[in-house]
Every structure is written in C-alpha cells, then in structure tokens.
Image (spheres, rainbow, N blue to C red):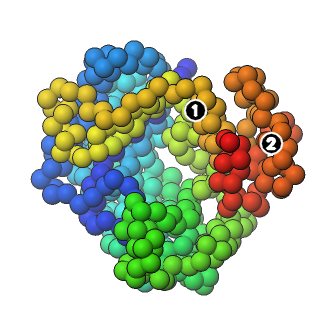
C-alpha cells in the first residue's frame, strides 16, 4: 500500500528570528481564520484543482503522516488545527500514524497540549535552538531557557511520548561552554528526536545579509568561526551517540524507532502534498509550490483558483541528482549500483575519487558519506553532480 505525506504550512510568527531565511513573517491574527478556511478548502478541492491545472498523475494511497510546519503553527487556535486535520481525514484515505506540530516553547500551555492530543497530534517538534538566554535574545527568539523545561513537562503530562528538539550550532555569542551546556540540557530532557542545524549565512536572512555586508547589527560580529561551528556539530554527534541516539540523516538523530517518518518521505523522494502559502508538493514526476503571500494565497483559493506560483516537470537528470543528494544525506547511504542501473549511467570514476579522498566509503554494497566528514558534505555533492 502506497503511503502519502501531507504537509500544512502555517507562515505566521510572533517575531522574525534574525537568522531565519524562510518566507514567513508577522501578520495580523485577523488573517488567521481566513487562512484556515482557505487551507481547508484547498484540501477538500485538491483533486479538482489538480485536474483543472493539468496534473493528472495524482498518486493513490493512504496518508499516514501529517506535518504542520512554519512559521509557528502553534499560534493557531487548537480548534483551527483540528479543523484542518478533519479536512485531511475527509479528503484522503487516512491512517494517520505520525501527526507533527511545530511549536515554540512560549506558546505551549496545558490547555493547548490537551487540545492538540484530542485533535490527533502525537508528535511535537519544539524550536528550542539554544538553552542560553543571551543567545536566544540575540537571535530574536521569544522564549527563554526556563520555558523549554516548563513546556516539556506540560507536553509529557499531556501524554506526548514523541518530542523533537531543534538546536542551532553557530548562534551569535555561542561558545564551546554554552554549546556543551545546551546539548547536556537537551540530553537531560531526553526528547525522542533531535535536529542540529549549522548556522547558514546567506542574504535571505537579516543576520546573514548583515554578515555579508560586514555590518554589526544582530550581533553579526559575535558569530562563532566556521571551524567552531563544525566543532560544535561534531561534539553534538559524539554526545548524542553516547546517549543512545541513532544518527540517521546529516542533521537528525533519533532514539530507536523515532525517526521522522514524514521527513523520510522527502529524502526518499516519496509523494507528498503541501497545503497553505508557500507549501510544496511532489507527485513523483512534477513539483509545484503555492504562492508565498498568505493573503494572496487565501484570496486565490477562496475564489476557486489553484494557488500555485511555480510548477516543473522533474527531468531524468534532476531525478538522478536528487537520488544522490537526498540519498547521501541519510547515514545509511545509497545503493549506487541500483541507481546506476535505474538511470543508465556510470558514476564509479567520480565515486572512487571521493573514496580516495576519504569523503565517502563503502558499507557493504552501499555508498555513504564518511561519518567523520559530514561537515564537508557539500563538497561531495558538488563533485558527484559535476
């Protein structure tokens, strides 16, 4: 039986974090109800909207994972979140095994947690980022260290047995000591899943643009060095492994059996459908993305129009690149022979060069990134895709 993933984008935030390069923002909460109505309508009219826009290849199957991302989906009222889940159940054959809600610590209350459980959520992904208040303030986060402990207890008391925490290696003012403390506090709370992201510097965020322009705002001069960021990541790898977490994707660790089933669909190129402003979808041969502006998105859907602003067919060359890039992000690696046969190509000369450089290694018949060189994974991808 084919399994489908459903993603719901909620682009609303209380504040815009300095490092954020997502197309999310602060909007009036007067828009929330209209937005929820549009998302529910997009879900219920999905087959008609696809057919009317020339997308005939709609994979059949059962939706087994749902992921509410953002933004900060926990800003929506629990009743609104439940309304969207009900629309998914009514529109797709469903056997919802993993239903994730991204939530910021300061937005979590006992009343909300109980309502989330009742609505069908069984996994909470909490944007912790750091346990150091100075780092959180510099990043523009609303919560503080104590909020994480408070929110974790609330979620456990409400019956959540699958929590995921995010940390960022490379926040302004971060030091080796503060990073070690953040990892140790996380391990004390022992979420079932952990994501560690190395700080990205690009012009898409206020902090990134300030760094590229050699400015001083947003604590741009207080960023750790690239080498320090890599060291923090590697320290995190070691401590999580010692605590029993399996490193299954470059940025993700899980206790046995708690890998993110939904995100695995992305890395395995399995079908998923996205709803809401800026959400992306993939049916196996085409990708499309909705309009990013939430008001324009809602207006389009409520007038019966397909809210898509980008659509492309995935060529065989693109599919091969994705198989390699996404497959090698997983620590289990790829079946290189199977990929070569599937796409009628030979990658051996490039692969053997990378093996000689100590960047990749053979694990039986599978090719994988060399575990101690994960921080230079982009070099591998560039070389393979030349």
Q: Is residue 85 visible?
A: no
**Residue 121, image x, y percentages:** 39, 45
Q: Is residue 67 left or right of residue 193?
A: left
User: Which residue in the protein does label 1 denote?
Assistant: 318
Q: Which mark is residue 351?
A: 2
Could you tell whether 245 is left or right of 40 in the image? right
Residue at 67% x, 41% y: name it.
Answer: 385
Q: Left or right: 326 with respect to 128?
A: right
Q: Is residue 111 or residue 60 the one in the foreground?
A: 60
Q: Residue at x 54, y 36 (%)?
A: 265
Which quadrant of the view contains residue 279?
A: top left
**Residue 373 is drawn in which quadrant?**
bottom right
Residue nearest the observer in this picture, 272 or 299: 299
Q: Could you tell me how many numbered marks the image carries?
A: 2
Seen from the viewer's position, the closer of residues 136 and 188 is: 136
| Image vertical order of residue 160 relative to residue 317, above or below | below
């Amino acid at each position: 039986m084919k399994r489908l993933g459903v993603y719901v984008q909620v682009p609303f935030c209380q504040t815009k974090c300095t490092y954020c390069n997502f197309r999310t923002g602060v909007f009036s909460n007067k828009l929330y109800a209209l937005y929820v109505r549009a998302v529910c309508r997009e879900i219920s009219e999905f087959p008609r909207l696809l057919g009317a826009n020339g997308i005939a290849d709609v994979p059949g199957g059962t939706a087994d994972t749902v992921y509410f991302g953002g933004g900060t989906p926990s800003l929506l009222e629990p009743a609104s979140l439940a309304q969207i889940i009900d629309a998914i159940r009514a529109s797709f054959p469903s056997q919802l095994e993993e239903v994730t809600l991204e939530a910021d610590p300061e937005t979590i209350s006992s009343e909300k947690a109980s309502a989330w459980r009742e609505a069908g959520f069984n996994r909470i992904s909490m944007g912790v980022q750091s346990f150091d208040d100075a780092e959180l303030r510099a990043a523009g986060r609303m919560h503080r260290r104590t909020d994480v402990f408070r929110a974790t207890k609330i979620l456990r008391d409400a019956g959540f047995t699958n929590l995921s925490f995010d940390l960022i290696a490379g926040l302004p003012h971060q030091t080796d000591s503060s990073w070690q403390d953040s990892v140790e506090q996380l391990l004390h709370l022992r979420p079932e899943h952990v994501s560690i992201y190395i700080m990205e510097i690009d012009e898409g965020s206020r902090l990134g643009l300030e760094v590229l322009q050699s400015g001083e705002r947003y604590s741009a001069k207080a960023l750790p060095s690239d080498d320090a960021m890599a060291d923090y990541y590697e320290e995190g790898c070691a401590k999580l492994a010692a605590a029993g977490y399996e490193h299954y994707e470059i940025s993700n660790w899980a206790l046995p059996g708690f890998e993110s089933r939904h995100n695995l669909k992305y890395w395995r190129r399995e079908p998923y459908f996205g709803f809401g402003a800026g959400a992306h979808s993939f049916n196996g041969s085409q990708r499309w993305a909705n309009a990013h502006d939430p008001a324009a998105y809602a207006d389009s859907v409520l007038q019966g129009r397909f809210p898509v602003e980008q659509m492309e067919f995935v060529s065989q060359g693109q599919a091969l690149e994705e198989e390699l890039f996404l497959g090698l992000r997983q620590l289990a690696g790829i079946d290189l022979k199977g990929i070569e046969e599937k796409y009628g190509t030979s990658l051996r000369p490039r692969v053997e060069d990378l093996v000689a450089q100590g960047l990749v290694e053979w694990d039986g018949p599978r090719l994988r990134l060399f575990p101690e060189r994960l921080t230079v994974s982009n070099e591998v991808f560039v070389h393979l895709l030349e």
